[in-house]
Image (cartoon, rainbow, N blue to C red):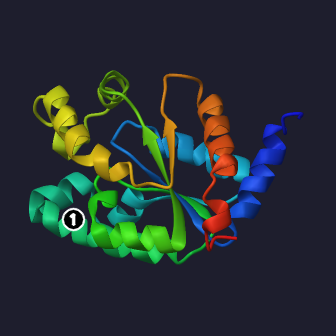
Amino acid sequence: MARRSIAKDAELAKQLLGNHAIVLVGLMGAGKTSVGRRLAEKLDVPFVDADHEIELAAGKSIPDIFAEHGEDYFREGERRVITRLLENGQQVLATGGGAFMNDETRARIKELGVSLWLKADLDVLLKRVAKRNDRPLLKENPAAVMKNLMEKRYPVYAEANITVESRDVQHGQMVNDVIKAIVDWDGWENSTHE
């Protein structure tokens, strides 16, 4: 059987999604924003970064929200913003690393979207997060913090509908891998997303 072109796969992925979002989950540095933007472009759907939308709604940066109000306050705002964004239909939605940990958020994503975990190993994550200094959770000992987050979050991320290994390859290759994984997901036949 001949392999479909990536353009055909992108068309099919968009069709399969119907009025639902592809929701990217994973740790900081997994590529949710960089891969997400390119994926949205390839699928010709809007790209939405939940963290950016949270900052707009709060009128301040995420580090400032953490510093002034704490993580619990931030997570509640994050839950409300993601719930609102999911109601916008077909899109690529990049979430913050902790968003999928919230039971209510996970349930809404399951109801209104298809979750896709960009799973990266520790070395890849550390290499990527070292490039930015705006990560409130990584102020001290990033390697220890990331290992701890992986232990806590990876079992929950594993509940995502689709998992794609985030590797150090060209962004275009990652986007193609994600599109192929969406098309090849065997959950479409049992899903309400048709």
Please state which of residues 186 and 154 is positioned toward the viewer in this rendering. 186
Residue at image position (21%, 52%) is 63
- Tag count in the figure? 1
Is 135 left or right of 95, judged from the image as shown? Answer: left
The spot of residue 140 in percent (x, y) is: 10, 32
At horizontal 38% and vertical 24% (from top left) the residue drawn is 124
In the picture, measured across the screen, residue 153 lies left or right of residue 26, that is left
Quadrant that contains the C terminus? bottom right
**Residue 58 visible (yes or no):** no
Q: Residue at x 59, y 25 (%)?
A: 170
Amino acid beneath label 1: Phe
Q: At which x and y percent is residue 12?
A: 78, 54
Residue 43 point in image, percent of width and height = 71, 52
From this view, report whether residue 11 is shown above or below residue 145. below
Q: Is residue 42 visible?
A: yes
The image shows residue 46 at horizontal and vertical percentages of 63, 61
The 10 Å Cα crowd at callout 1, few under 14, some 14 to 19, many 20 or more, is: some
121, 155: nearer the viewer = 155
**Which residue, given by chain and number where applicable, does mark 1 sit on?**
74
